[in-house]
Image (tube, coloured by chain):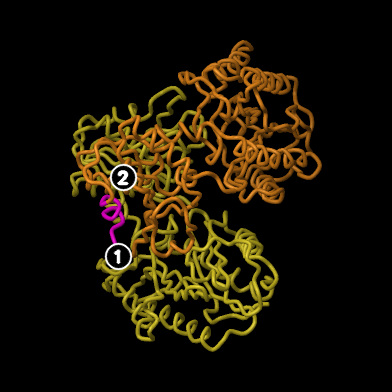
Chain colours: A yellow, B orange
Amino acid sequence: MAFDYSGRLERLKDLMGDRGVDVVLLSAGADLSYFTGYEAMASERLTVLVVTIDGEPVLLVPELEAPRLEVGPFEVVAWGETDDPVEIATRQRRFPERVAVGDHMWSAFTIAFQKNWTEAIWVPASTLTRELRMRKDRIEIEELRRAARGVDLVMGRIQDEVRFSGRTERDVARDLSAMTVEVGHDTAEFTIVASGPNGASPHHTPGDRVIERGDIVVCDFGGRWEGYYSDSTRTFCVGEPSVGEAEVHGLVQEANQAGRETVRPGVPCSEIDRAARSVIEAAGYGEYFIHRTGHGIGLEVHEHPYIVKGNDMPLEIGMTFSIEPGVYIPDRFGVRIEDIVACSERGPDTLNAADRSMVRVD
Amino acid sequence: MAFDYSGRLERLKDLMGDRGVDVVLLSAGADLSYFTGYEAMASERLTVLVVTIDGEPVLLVPELEAPRLEVGPFEVVAWGETDDPVEIATRQRRFPERVAVGDHMWSAFTIAFQKNWTEAIWVPASTLTRELRMRKDRIEIEELRRAARGVDLVMGRIQDEVRFSGRTERDVARDLSAMTVEVGHDTAEFTIVASGPNGASPHHTPGDRVIERGDIVVCDFGGRWEGYYSDSTRTFCVGEPSVGEAEVHGLVQEANQAGRETVRPGVPCSEIDRAARSVIEAAGYGEYFIHRTGHGIGLEVHEHPYIVKGNDMPLEIGMTFSIEPGVYIPDRFGVRIEDIVACSERGPDTLNAADRSMVRVD
């Protein structure tokens, strides 16, 4: 997938001018991919794109990784194993006043840069890069839709193909990871299988617990598909749920729908959170919804915009994010239902379509 | 695997005293695991262990991840989705003079900490933590040996079980990743399959190139096994190598052996690099060995000590690292042979044992 990297870099420079930023430093990660197409390896060997307000961007790479690079709208400088890449990078600009550094750049590198540019003010690069990355173009939305459909396919196959009872969470997670790759993802990046009381831990790591008949099981997984992420959650029941469990599931489903239906250009992110949360609060379960309603998604599984109280940024066409309300009852069970939604001119464009009801599994 | 986290934290505090460090901040990653046993998720939600020179360590975690934690020799503080965790963390210490921040902590967090502690001097935490982590105890070496044996098992199965010719690098990489998990690793973390001319790119990403008879193929892979990493490389030939290819392979094998045989307590890291490199240089291939000879390994696949020119740190008993000389001939092929070695009282304890000769595959 070839994007217009020159255009993106030009828009970044425009933003740098607006914000008085002299230098942007982007190391391995999504920002670097977004502006260059290069998927660098994060390691103790620094890869960094140095974008100065008035020069050609320079991509510094470890010499042994230089053969991985394709040409792009930047100069490539390969540094050798006994060179100091930070020293080489700082030669690109003398005495910058304001430096924007990639949010995920390793702090050891930032500290080294700070020793060279002692007078600069440091800001996270996402203050600039999110302005570009948050608004997906049509191609990016179609990439996200393809990944979402992949994970939907897996969700749809679970009832027929995955046995739960008598197996450990880890076993089920392995099946889901394998299927995630099988349907076409390049990698399965995360797989939560949280059964029974473990479901009350939203980020539970699948473990040795043997799943039993009657368990409610939260399955939250996704992967990368040519750079773009999928991320979806459905909550299953091994056999029949109790009345209380079914009630909580219905509530979360309603909250998911309320959140999605609120999506349209101009609505603040916080309002999506409020719409989903108020359904759960009205039913008296507010204290059990212990996380924000969602997160942006694209080249990263979590990115801007965040769908959370306090974020009053208005939605714009092309923003893509999760809506994933949940209820977590300590020592008993949890329920979460998560879809990826794009904000379109007409309102919500929900990229996931798998059955949101509590599907029974064996 | 339960380690003595209290003892490790005590030794960290001793080092903080020696170096005049008031606060150590460790976010998700190997340092945090080493001192607490907690495997946090790296994300925009900050998890951070705050170790102050004179108080009980405090582990800040996002509220939704608090259920994942077990008790340990630290206080746990869960922060909610609308709290500011950096502000909470900085309350643990007023006006620190010197702060050591985890090397991999996201820069966005470090910049936020720097806004709260404006007068502090910032140093990478590895300047302290490597003093502890570099010297593995007997249990850690056995963990690394188990992982190494796992990857050896996969290497040993390749000749009989993996077909190369007519398949893409990506296909072969998938087989190797699947086998890495099958033998017992928790995850396959990286898999390089670099065939023919792609072998000249040391960190090649397996792609669509169809492997042909006569190709030399570098296979470099490993995974995590209960927290500890394996990492090994062997170079295969699809059918028969040419005389020149066999000669280069023999040379690299000799360099690998020379590097390993030089390992003993007191020898500088740079001397291991020199020993391996001089074999390749003497044969006139020095310009084609474009990387350092090795890297430490443990809870991270790359960690201290680095086996590189300029690192004159003497080896000590319990240090574990790779020895992985290579020769990379642009547009033609590459060869690399990598073993993990522990420095023992008696000299090298090579954890990998798979056949180092150029095994023929179909």
Q: What residue type is labelled 2?
A: Thr
SS assignment for the magenta stretch, majority: helix
Q: In which quarter of the image is residue A58?
A: top left
Q: Position of residue B70 (x, y in %)?
A: 49, 58
Mark drawn on residue B82:
1
The residue sitting at the right extreme is B160
Pick the residue in front: A153 or B24: B24
Q: Quadrant of the image for the C terminus of chain A?
A: bottom right
Q: Residue at x 77, y 31 (%)?
A: B359
User: Which of the two discs, 2 and 1, labels the residue nearer the N terminus?
Assistant: 1
Q: Is residue B306 above or below residue B168?
A: above
Chain letter of mark 1 equals B
Q: Distance between the residues labelled 2 and 1?
A: 19 Å
Q: Where is residue B341 in the image (x, y as percent from the top left)?
A: 63, 28
Q: Position of residue B353 (x, y in %)?
A: 73, 32
From the viewer's perspective, tell me whether residue A160 is left or right of residue A59. right
Q: Position of residue B82 (x, y in %)?
A: 30, 65
Q: Element under label 2?
A: helix
Q: Which residue, given by chain and number where applicable, does mark 2 sit on?
A: B110
The residue sitting at the bottom extreme is A243
The residue sitting at the top extreme is B282
- From which residue to which does the magenta span run? B83-91
Q: Residue at x 64, y 21 (%)?
A: B347
Mark drawn on residue B9:
none
